[in-house]
Structures are given as C-alpha cells and as structure tokens.
Image (cartoon, helix red, strand yellow):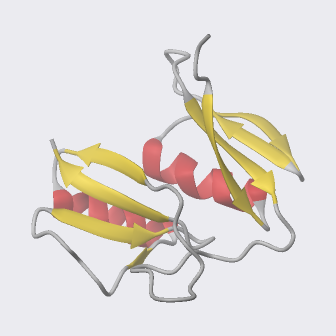
Amino acid sequence: MRLCSTVLGTPDPRGLARFYQRLLGWPIVTDDPEWATLRPEDGSAGLSFQLETDHVAPTWPQGPGDQQMQQHLDIEVDDLEAAGRVAAEAGATLADFQPQEDVRVWLDPAGHPFCLFVG
C-alpha cells in the first residue's frame, strides 16, 4: 500500500487546485469540475480536491458547536514572511489566532487551515 493523495472537500475543486498549485508549484494532473489533483514532479503523494456542494469550512480555532477541523496541512518553507506573501497573493487569509510564534496559520479559499513553518 502507498498513500497517493490527501483529499480536501471544496465547492470549487478546480479553484482550490489552482490555489495550491500557486502555493506549492506542483502541476495539475487531473482537472475536472468534480475532482482535481496536484502531484509533485517526483510522483510522491499529492493533493486532490473533491466537490462538496454543501461544504462547511472548519472554524479555527474551534469553539463549542463549531465545525471541527479534522486535518490541516503543514508546509515547510525557507522564509516565513516571504511564504506568507505568496500565500496571501494566491488567495489565503491569515488566521486571527496564531498559537505559535514560529508558525503561521493560514486559511485556504475553502477555509481549510494550513500551517507555514521554517524547517
């Protein structure tokens, strides 16, 4: 067995694929209205985006009764501030709550949290 992809639900698979393509630089290998996939050039595990017409974005940080975050992506970067500018230009929103000084929590256009950190 081999993990080939992490799948994120979204009302706009193509749009979210293009967001992560700008962020990660990976090529889009599947580009359908209900399913899109990015995969690194080396063929390792990528990201897929599945149509969820009733998608409810998770709340960060979660409070009582809020939509729970069930996963998030950790993205290693060389420069936290420069990567944050790229994320913002691609369409991400900086989360209000930042639990660590050396990590930045961002929200993608569908509301999924992801973390940028210097490795």
- Image coordinates for residue 22, horizontal then vertical, percent: 51, 52
Q: Position of residue 1 (x, y in %)?
A: 62, 10
Pinpoint residue 21: horizontal percent, then vertical percent.
56, 47
Residue at point 54%, 66% (across, down): 112
Q: Which quarter of the rendering shows the C terminus?
A: top left
Q: Taking 60 as reference, is 52 above or below it?
A: above
**Residue 11's quadrant in the figure?**
bottom right
Left or right: residue 114 versus residue 67 is: left
Residue 20 lies left or right of residue 52; in this view the side is: left
**Number of numbered labels in the structure image:** 0
Q: What residue is drawn where x is 53% and y is 35%?
A: 26
Q: Position of residue 82 (x, y in %)?
A: 22, 60
**Residue visible at 78% across and 51% down?**
50
In the image, taking residue 103 as reference, residue 93 lies left or right, namely: right
The residue positioned 64% from the left and 53% from the top of the image is 18
Residue 118 or 87: which is nearer the viewer? 118
- Please tell me whether residue 2 is drawn above or below residue 83 in the rendered image: above
The vertical placement of 65 against 84, above or below, is below
Taking the image as shown, residue 3 lies to the left or right of residue 32, namely: left
